[in-house]
Image (cartoon, rainbow, N blue to C red):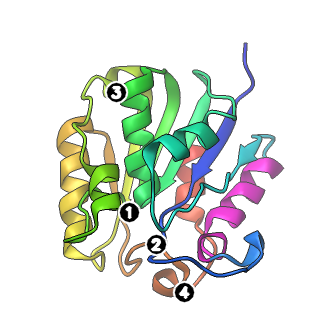
Amino acid sequence: MPERNCIIVHGCPAGPEGELHVETRSYDQHWMPWVRERLIERNIPTLTPLMPNPWAPDYTNFRQEFEKHPVSERTILIGHSCGCAFLVRWLGESKRKIDTLVLVAPWKIPRAGDAKRKAFYDYPIDETIKRRVRRILMFTSDTEKDDGKKSLAIYHAALAGDVVHLPGKGHYTISDMGTHEFPELLSKIS
């Protein structure tokens, strides 16, 4: 039987973040490194791959990077923002079975005039995903942006699953949460 593991797919920043080291990119300052370390401490190997040019997301490029990592029926997949859009599309196309899918502040609505993100977000959600995933969780907040709330409704209508509403968490970024810790997520998946 394959080992239980987790892959966390980060979101997409508004623009390039310069020549910063990977450790200082905005998505590595959110909750992802903290969750990764806590899961590793619990003997769940966890990866947070860096997706190529995430400020101009391209599904094919994301898929090529993502598929370098093992996914099995025991895998936990966690996405943040546009990382959720990638995971849902990948699960729909690959028809893979996994243990748990967690969508944190899921996003599916592109900004007006953003052709790259429109191509990334504009796909039909395969509703059969819910038959291949043992558990689906979605995190949102009362302080999430309106398009984020609409995006959550789109995913929930297609995939069902449990919605976790946490007050004051916004888009689940370090600036919205005020902390890099995310114990509520950890308690739901481990």
As drawn, is 151 to the left or to the right of 23?
Answer: left
Is the Cβ of the residue at disc 2 closer than 8 Å to that at disc 3?
no
Q: Are marks 2 and 4 in contact (CB under 8 Å)?
A: no
Q: Earlier in the sequence, mark 2 or mark 3?
A: 3
Nearer-N-terminus badge (1/3): 1
Q: Main secondary structure of the magenta part?
A: helix
The C terminus appears in which quarter of the rendering? top right
Residue type at tag 2: Tyr
Disc 2 designates what residue? 172
Residue at position x 44%, y 26% in the image:
134
User: Does residue 31 belong to the magenta stretch?
Assistant: yes
Give the mark nearest the N terminus, 1 or 4: 1
Q: Which residue is mark 4?
A: 178
Q: Which amino acid lies under the numbered mark 4 shown in the image of this protein?
A: Gly
Q: Could you say whether the residue bearing mark 2 is in a helix, strand or loop?
A: loop
Whether residue 107 is visible here, answered yes or no, is: no
Residue that mark 3 sits on: 129
Q: Say whether marks 4 and 3 touch (CB < 8 Å).
A: no
Magenta range is: 26-41
Question: In the structure shown, which secondary structural element does the residue marked by tag 4 occupy?
Answer: loop
**C-alpha distance separating marks 2 and 4:** 9 Å
Give the image quarter of residue 171: bottom left
Residue 83, label in figure: none
In this rendering, the count of numbered labels is 4
Amino acid type indicated by mark 3? Ile
Indicate the quadrant containing the N terminus: top left, top right, bottom left or bottom right: top right
**Whether residue 90 is situated above or below residue 150 in the rendered picture:** above
- Which circle, 1 or 4, is nearer the viewer? 1
